[in-house]
Amino acid sequence: LLITFFMLTTSLSKPQSMDLGLPDKNPDSTKIDPKLKVDQKRTMTIIMGKDNKIKWFHGLIEEPEPNGAPTDAVYGKNGLRKEILKRVVSVNEYCKTKPTYKEGDGLIVIIKPSKKSTYRNLVDILDEMAICNVPTYAIVNDISDEEQKLVNEMNK
């Protein structure tokens, strides 16, 4: 009787999930402008390699802004989270000075997992996006030649 009582009165833990916005299955190519320019001062790219290795940079890798060269990082609050939080604050301040940006515009993070990265590391980075309140982020599997060189360095 006790077992039945506890089974009926106890609530089981519910699985936690994160909402992800996925692209349409059949996107209309006329709706997307392929030449869409994003302010590189607002972007941060995170490239994931094997063995929990990651590199990040600001802007475009071909045209790194000052102090935006690819940098090694580690997961956790004293690693990647610290860099993301710094970048969120600086981008928010930058957006306040530009009249073209509205409330809610901020940091854009591009997450690029390599073929050797792990699912756990991707989940860790998505958790960092939620913790740091990054308004816009995307998981992209298109790695440029310059970024592939970084991946090859990490995977050695």
Image (cartoon, grey):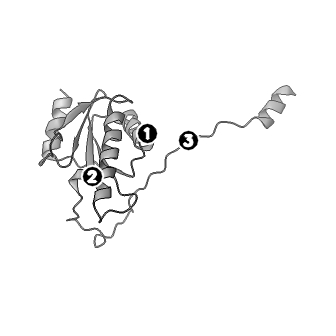
Label 3 close to label 1 by CB (< 8 Å): no
The residue singled out by tag 3 in the image is 16
- Residue drawn 14% across the image and 43% down it: 66
Question: Which residue appears at 30% of the width and 34% of the height?
Answer: 117
**The C terminus lies in quadrant:** top left
Q: Depth-wise, is mark 3 or mark 1 nearer the camera?
A: 1
Identify the disc placed on residue 42.
2
Q: CA distance from mark 2 to mark 1?
A: 20 Å
Q: Which residue is mark 1?
A: 127
- Residue beneath the point at 79% across and 36% down: 9
- Under mark 2, the amino acid is Arg
Identity of the residue drawn at 34% across and 53% down: 106
Q: Is residue 76 above or below residue 17?
A: above
Q: Quadrant of the N terminus?
A: top right
Kind of residue at badge 1: Asp
Check disc 1: other Cα within 10 Å, few if <14, some if 14-19, many if 20+: some
- Upstream in sequence: badge 3 or badge 2: 3
